[in-house]
């Protein structure tokens, strides 16, 4: 899987060389390239933004640098197997299913917007050539798409076979199918008693049936309390 990042702050993505994703890069499962969008500017000030047509506060990212970056990175031929991800507050909510689907992609290009956003014609042009996903990380505004791109990258790449040491740990997570889309139950480890707090008896019983039942009940209770929206049968 090749991942490209178009951004005016490419150093944001140096962090991807650390830990899990770093190992995935070292063993060639993932190939990461961060690009400074100013590479594709030609004026002395390397301008990437301009005032909004129609007025209003703030600045908008000019289309030209994006178009020239697409030309260099992707060429002009349409290819639906290339996924262009644009993190934006106005995107559709990024969810585990999106991470799962994108984990099968051979190529993802993250376009990290700043200011008030990217000239919409960039999205229109990209949509004619590649598979475009305008995705939101949540209902809040960041200064730019870089942090959202990092979060989405981690959610996607950890699902790629060979990246996680123990694929087992994927199945029992919140939002995973095995959990029926419920929140994950509380977890414990040694010592059995810690500052007056004990591990629930059932988990020390060695009775796998009772443990599984307790975990299912905990997941349902937690989901009912914190995320009733995830409960389908009520
Ligand atoms: O702020 C975000 O992206 C940066 C961005 C992009 C375009 C215009 C303004 C800000 C964001 C929030 N949830 N998901 C993404």
Image (cartoon, helix red, strand yellow):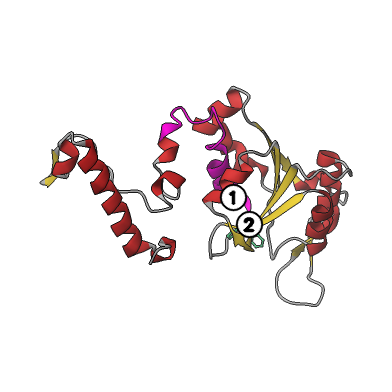
Q: Which residues fall within the magenta stretch? A: 144-168
Residue 50 pos. (x, y %): 80, 64
Above or below for 123 versus 21: below
Which residue is situated farthest in the bottom direction here?
55
Q: How many marks?
A: 2
82 horizontally vs 146: left or right = right
The residue under label 1 is 98
Q: Position of 96 compared to 10: left or right?
A: left
State the residue lying farthest toward the top.
27
**Where residue 47 sits: x, y (%)?**
81, 55
Pick whichever of labels 2 and 1 is earlier in the sequence. Answer: 1
Q: Report helix, strand or loop for mark 1.
A: helix
Secondary structure under the numbered disc 2 in the rendered image: strand
Mark 2, residues whose alpha carbon is within 10 Å: few (<14), some, or many (≥20)? many
State the residue in front, 48 or 182.
182
Residue 209 appearing in the image: yes
Residue 62 in view, yes or no: no
Residue drawn at point x = 70 percent, y = 74 percent: 57
Q: Contact (CB < 8 A) between labels 2 and 1? A: yes
Cα–Cα span, label 2 and label 1: 9 Å
Name the spot of residue 169 as percent of width and height, x first. Answer: 41, 35
**Side of 150 relative to 109 (left or right):** left
Residue drawn where x is 61% and y is 45% of the image: 101
Write the residue at 81% across / 57% down.
122
- According to the picture, the residue beneath numbered tag 2 turns out to be 135
Foreground of the two, 139 or 215: 215
Image quadrant for the C terminus?
Answer: bottom left
């Amino acid at each position: 899987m090749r991942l490209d990042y178009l951004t005016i702050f490419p150093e944001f993505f140096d962090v991807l060389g650390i830990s899990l994703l770093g190992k995935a890069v070292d063993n060639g499962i993932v190939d990461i390239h961060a690009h400074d969008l100013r590479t594709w500017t030609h004026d002395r000030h390397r301008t990437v933004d301009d005032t909004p047509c129609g007025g209003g506060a703030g600045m908008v990212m000019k289309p030209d640098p994006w178009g020239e970056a697409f030309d260099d990175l992707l060429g002009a031929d349409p290819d639906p197997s290339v996924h262009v991800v644009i993190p934006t507050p106005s995107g559709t909510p990024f969810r585990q299913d999106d991470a799962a689907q994108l984990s099968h992609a051979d190529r993802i290009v993250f376009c990290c917007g700043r200011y008030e956003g990217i000239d919409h014609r960039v999205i229109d042009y990209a949509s004619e050539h590649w598979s475009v996903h305008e995705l939101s990380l949540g209902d809040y505004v960041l200064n730019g798409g870089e942090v959202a791109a990092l979060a989405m990258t981690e959610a996607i790449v950890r699902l790629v076979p060979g990246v996680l040491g123990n694929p087992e740990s994927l199945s029992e997570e919140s939002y995973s199918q095995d959990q029926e889309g419920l929140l994950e139950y509380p977890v414990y480890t040694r010592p059995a008693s810690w500052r007056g707090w004990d591990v629930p008896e059932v988990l020390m019983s060695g009775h796998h049936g009772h443990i599984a039942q307790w975990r299912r009940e905990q997941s349902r209770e937690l989901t009912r309390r914190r995320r009733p929206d995830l409960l389908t049968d009520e």
